[in-house]
Image (cartoon, rainbow, N blue to C red):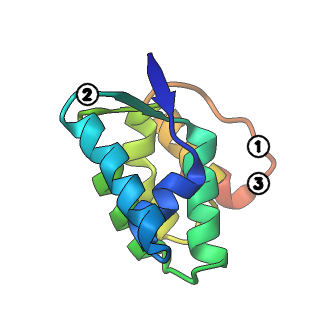
Amino acid sequence: MINIIDTNIILRYIVGDDESQKIMARKVFLEAEKGRIKLQIKTVVIAEVCYVLESFYKKSRNEIANKMEVLLSAKWLKVEDRKPMLLMWQWYRENLHFVDSFLIACSKSNFCKVISFDKKLNNKL
């Protein structure tokens, strides 16, 4: 069985602002790393993590991108849309929105062609 992790597990793991939840989140990731459980992260959860880190915790996009690249690179973690998820951070660091960065990465990964009225996005495609 695959376990889908929620935003709050990732936030406690990264930010650690609630000590007891931080310990539990680390245990979940350690169990997955050791192969005892299977974890999956959905794209929408990654988007929410980035939004909360940026808006509530006031983290820089560079800091968020660095943390996400490390987490999403873990081979023991099943990442939905892994290839574009790992590619998108360069555009996110350039101050493009999460979704725009993800769409560019999808396009560059040959997953899709993006059709948009957004000139800033179209200029990156």
Across and down, in percent, residue 79 comes to 42, 34
Disc 1 and disc 2: Cα gap in Å?
A: 43 Å
Q: For residue 97, say whether it is visible.
A: yes
> Which badge, 3 or 2, is on the more N-terminal residue?
2
- Could you give the CA–CA distance between mark 3 and mark 2, rounded to whole angstroms? 44 Å
Q: Marks 1 and 2: which is nearer the front?
A: 2
Name the disc covering residue 36, or none. 2
Sequence-wise first label, 1 or 2: 2
Q: Which residue is mark 3?
A: 118
The answer to whether residue 123 of the structure is visible from this angle is no
Q: Residue furthest front?
A: 20
Mark 1 belongs to which amino acid? Ser
Which residue is rendered at x = 36% and y = 63% of the image? 67
Q: Residues within 10 Å of mark 1 (few under 14, many from 20)?
A: few
Image quarter of residue 64: bottom left
Name the residue: 40% across, 55% down. Answer: 24
68 in relation to 117, above or below: below
Q: Residue at x 57, y 26 (%)?
A: 112
Which disc number belongs to residue 116? 1
Label 1 and label 3: CA atoms lie apart by: 5 Å
